[in-house]
Image: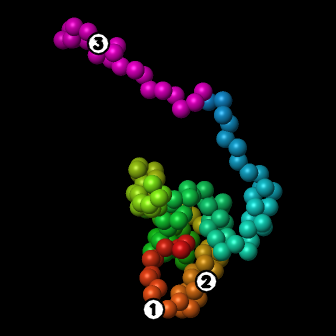
């Protein structure tokens, strides 16, 4: 348009993107006491290590359930987010992070490292109790 090459601006016919909201919805997060209460309430749950990891790292649900042991370095105290498991139409689909920001390293505190060590021990114990039909997935949470 500035160079006089077009007779009209094609953007005049385009609809602007819609806002995802008016910004008035405030994100509600749990307080420390509410989080502690939740973790205490699910302390006997088989997935307690999953809830703990999500709560203390901020990982998304799909990232946590897609976490593989090969992406966890307990000695260095970190894990790498490289994929997510996403339910779509009653199927679980493996999804790569869409952006470089989504592919990231998460630093683990000593308490989370101990929880993951306990998860590994429990998983090995369960594996030894199962028959030869066991299929190793490499997933941290099965």
| Residue 7 within the magenta-colored segment of the rendering | yes
How busy is the neighbourhood of tag 2: few (under 14 within 10 Å), some, or many (20 plus)? few
Q: What percent of the width, then of the height, locates residue 64?
A: 54, 63
Q: Is residue 13 left or right of residue 83?
A: left
**Nearer the observer, 31 or 12:** 12
Q: Residue at x 58, y 30 (%)?
A: 21
Q: Earlier in the sequence, mark 3 or mark 1?
A: 3
How busy is the neighbourhood of tag 1: few (under 14 within 10 Å), some, or many (20 plus)? few
Residue holding disc 1: 132
Image quadrant where one finds the N terminus: top left
Q: Is residue 113 left or right of residue 78?
A: right
Q: What percent of the width, then of the height, locates residue 59?
A: 57, 58
Q: Residue at x 45, y 87 (%)?
A: 133
- Residue 89 picture quarter: bottom left
Which stretch appears magenta? 1-22
Q: What percent of the width, then of the height, locates residue 105?
A: 49, 61
Q: How far separated are the C-alphas under marks 3 and 1?
A: 68 Å
**Nearer the observer, 131 or 41:** 131
Q: Earlier in the sequence, mark 2 or mark 1?
A: 2
Q: Is residue 61 shown above or below 13?
A: below
Q: Earlier in the sequence, mark 2 or mark 3?
A: 3
- SS assignment at label 1: loop
- Dominant SS of magenta comes to loop
Residue extending furthest toward the front:
90
Residue holding disc 3: 9
Q: Is residue 56 left or right of residue 71?
A: right
- SS assignment at label 2: helix
**Nearer the observer, 109 or 35:** 35
């Amino acid at each position: 348009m500035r160079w006089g090459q077009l007779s009209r601006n094609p953007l005049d016919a385009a609809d602007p993107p819609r806002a995802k909201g008016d910004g008035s919805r405030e994100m509600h997060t749990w307080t420390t006491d509410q989080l502690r209460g939740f973790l205490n309430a699910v302390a006997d749950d088989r997935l307690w290590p999953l809830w703990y990891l999500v709560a203390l790292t901020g990982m998304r649900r799909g990232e946590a359930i897609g976490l593989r042991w090969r992406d966890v370095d307990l000695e260095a105290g970190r894990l790498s987010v490289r994929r997510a498991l996403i339910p779509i139409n009653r199927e679980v689909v493996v999804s790569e992070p869409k952006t470089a920001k989504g592919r990231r390293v998460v630093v683990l505190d000593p308490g989370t490292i101990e929880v993951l060590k306990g998860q590994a021990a429990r998983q090995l114990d369960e594996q030894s109790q199962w028959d030869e039909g066991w299929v190793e997935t490499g997933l941290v949470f099965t």
